[in-house]
Image (cartoon, grey):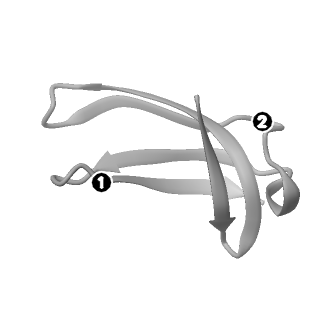
C-alpha cells in the first residue's frame, strides 16, 4: 500500500492505493491497482477507482488514474 498527497483534477488531499504486478524487468503483466475505499481526505474524500502504473526507462514512476470524485 502507498499514499498519495497532492492535487487530482484540481482537488487537493490524499488517498491510499494498493498495487501489484508481475514483471521480468522489461514488462508488466497481471497488474492490479485500486484506490483504497474510504482513504480519501480533504477535497479527495470519497475518491474511488482504479489505475495503472508505468516506469520510464530513467526510473520515473507514472500513475494513470481511472477515478470518481
Report x, y in % for residue 45: 85, 52
Q: Residues within 10 Å of mark 1 (few under 14, many from 20)?
A: few
User: Circle 2 — which element?
Assistant: loop
Closer-to-camera residue (1/67): 1
Mark 2 in CB contact with mark 1 (< 8 angstroms): no
Quarter-of-image position of residue 17? top right
Q: Would residue 33 appear left or right of 47 to someone viewing this image?
A: left
Q: CA distance from mark 2 to mark 1?
A: 26 Å
* Residue beneath the point at 85% across and 50% down: 46
> Which is in the foreground here, disc 2 or disc 1?
1
Quarter-of-image position of residue 30? top left
Quadrant assignment for the N terminus: top right
* Residue beneath the point at 79% across and 47% down: 40
Query: Which residue bears the numbered disc 2?
Result: 37
User: Circle 1 — which element?
Assistant: loop
Q: Residues within 10 Å of mark 2 (few under 14, many from 20)?
A: some
* Residue beneath the point at 83% across and 37% down: 38
Report x, y in % for residue 56: 23, 54
Quadrant assignment for the C terminus: bottom right
Query: Which residue bears the numbered disc 1?
Result: 60
Determine which of the numbered discs, if any, sits on residue 52 in the image: none
Amino acid at each position: 500500500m502507498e499514499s498519495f498527497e497532492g492535487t487530482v483534477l484540481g482537488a487537493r488531499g490524499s488517498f491510499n492505493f494498493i498495487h501489484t504486478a508481475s514483471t521480468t524487468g522489461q514488462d508488466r503483466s497481471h497488474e492490479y491497482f485500486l484506490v483504497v475505499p474510504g482513504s480519501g481526505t480533504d477535497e479527495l474524500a470519497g475518491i474511488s477507482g482504479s489505475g495503472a502504473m508505468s516506469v520510464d526507462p530513467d526510473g520515473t514512476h507514472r500513475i494513470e488514474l481511472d477515478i470518481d470524485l
